[in-house]
Image: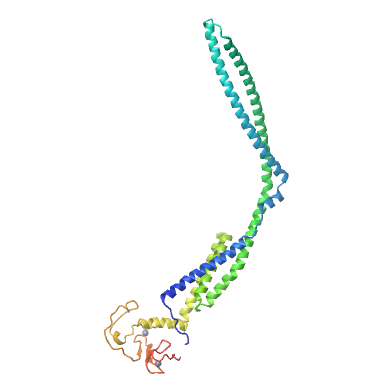
Amino acid sequence: MSSKAQPKGPWVHRFLIRLFTAIFAVLVYWVLGFLVKDIQSIAGPQYDVIEKAHVDQKLVTKQQRLNGDLGRVARNIANKQAELKLVSDSSRNLQKTINQLIELQKLSIQKSVALSATEQETLSSSLSHFLESQKQYQAHNIELSTLTEQKRALAADQLATEGLLEKQRKPAQEEYRQLRAKHQMRLACFQLLILIPLLAAGAFLLLRKRSSIYFPLFLGYGVATLLKVSRVIHEYFPSRYFKYILILVLLVAVAKLLVYFIRVVAFPKTEWLTKQYREAYERFLCPICEYPIRIGPRKFLFWTRRTVHKIILPQSEQENEPYACPACGTALFESCADCNGVRHSLLPNCQHCASEKRT
Ligand SMILES: [Zn+2]
Ligand SMILES: [Zn+2]
């Protein structure tokens, strides 16, 4: 066996490797994000252009003119109402004055005293003013009702035009909707066209370079690409379909993992076996049946996988002789064929001369 156990390195280095893997993944995710954004900025269909093709432009100008006219008439009506209010205020004042003068006249008749000339003058002029303002009021009222009539006609016309425009706009909106959906689909395809090969490359690296020392690099890249692809898919395809895609991908991934572990258990690779054996030897348990390996100071003790490091060992000489598991009969320590020292039977190298076990 040629593979040497890999050195793990100090924890700072391991921590830094994890940190940089995460940073690397974030950076890859960003780069992919820029790519996707650039693709998304491709211009789509313009609603204005489509509407022009469908809607009669004469109607549009007519509608604009009607809107302008309506605004003007509304302003005129407001002005007229203000004038009307002024006139009615002044005529009310006049009426008050006249009433007072008439009251005065009544009193003077009762006392048989004639009204003074100025009073008479005021009364007659107030009366004529009052009549004048009543006339004005009437005129303004007539103008106001004409304006209101105009406004009503304009509003009716506008409503009819709006209805026509609405009818013509409907196909335009429908066409825009379709074009837009097509455009979105095209954008999604462009994005996936770029992302899927990148994802495939990531998956390939992850599966094929599992034992490479640069695995964290591939892991960061793979995870970032997978995240971006799922985001793009989620954005463009209704979640109803996305749900199925996601569950399918997950199913495939879990099935692959399951198959992998089943194969590891069924046909253990030497690497895996060595790891398993090493851990068992470290706990002084038989790698095959987990029965305690009672050698040296441990001869009369008992322990399990959990308690092995808690028991206190009595002072005693380490024995150096071959040993086999009393439970399953597997040879666990044997004499080295090269140096005759006692070595682990199930580990690849001799602890004295480092020679590899010949199989
Ligand atoms: Zn055993
Ligand atoms: Zn040896």
Residue 174's spot in the image, x, y percent? 66, 52
**Quadrant hosting residue 163:** top right
Farthest-out residue, front: 118
Query: Considering depth in this image, is 149 or 344 the residue closer to the camera?
Result: 149
Left of 316 or right of it: where is 76? right
Vertical placement of residue 290 versus 146, above or below: below
| Residue drawn at (64%, 19%) of the image | 132
- Identify which residue is drawn at 57% across, 70% down: 199
Q: Is residue 88 visible?
A: yes
Q: Residue at x 59, y 64 (%)?
A: 36
Above-or-below relation of 359 to 92: below
Image position of 352 with respect to 51: above or below: below
Looking at the picture, how far across and down is residue 285, in whole percent?
35, 82
**Residue farthest left in this picture:** 314
Locate residue 35 relative to residue 318 in the image: left or right. Answer: right
| Count of number-bearing discs | 0
Q: Is residue 289 visible?
A: no
Q: Nearer the viewer, residue 202 or 171?
A: 202
Query: Which residue is more in the foreground, 57 or 324?
Result: 57
Q: Does residue 264 appear to the left or right of 119 in the view shown?
A: left
Q: Splitting the image into four quadrants, where does ligand 1 fall?
A: bottom left
- Would residue 260 appear left or right of 342 to someone viewing this image? right
Task: Give the colour scheme shown.
Answer: rainbow
Looking at the rendering, which quadrant does residue 322 occupy?
A: bottom left
Q: In the image, residue 17 lies at what x, y percent? A: 46, 73
Q: Outermost residue toward the top?
A: 112
Quadrant assignment, res 311: bottom left
Estimate the x, y position of residue 226 in percent, counting from the top left: 54, 68
